[in-house]
Image (cartoon, rainbow, N blue to C red):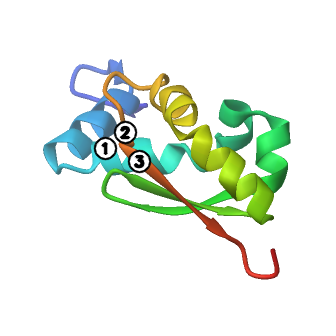
Amino acid sequence: MREVRGGSLQRIGPLVDGLLRARGLAEGVERASVIPEWTRLVGPQIARVATPVGFDRRTLFVEVRSSAWLMELEMMERRILATLNSDHERGVFERIVFRLAEGG
């Protein structure tokens, strides 16, 4: 918190949020927040075999450990998207690109 005239304190969170929105960066921050929250969002079973590696606009890129899991996750894409987008007012991702991890 910072002190403003008159000695009252103001929370910085809303100020940062407003600045991000004004600069058009809020959506990118929302998308990036999915990566550290991956295990909580998709569950430990999927998190053990699939790792988000980045995003471009509204597409999330996920590396998968085996071709069997790759096929399984491709069939689950809509359900995973719904879960990822449920934490946000508007959906942050429109699609997921699953790719086989090197050595997978």
Q: Quadrant of the C terminus?
A: bottom right
Q: Amino acid at mark 2?
A: Val
Q: Which residue is at 35% across, 31% downward?
A: 91
Q: Nearer the viewer, residue 59 or 87?
A: 59
Real-space Cα distance between discs 2 and 1? 7 Å
Real-space Cα distance between discs 3 and 1? 15 Å
Q: Is residue 78 left or right of residue 62?
A: left
Q: Which residue is mark 2?
A: 92
Q: Nearer the viewer, mark 3 or mark 1?
A: 3
Q: Which residue is at 26% across, 50% downward?
A: 25
x%, y% of residue 65?
79, 64
- Residue found at the very far left of the displayed protein: 22
Q: Earlier in the sequence, mark 3 or mark 1?
A: 1
Q: Is there a contact, CB below 8 Å, between mark 2 and mark 1?
A: yes
Q: Which residue is at 34% across, 21% downward?
A: 89
Q: Which residue is mark 1?
A: 27
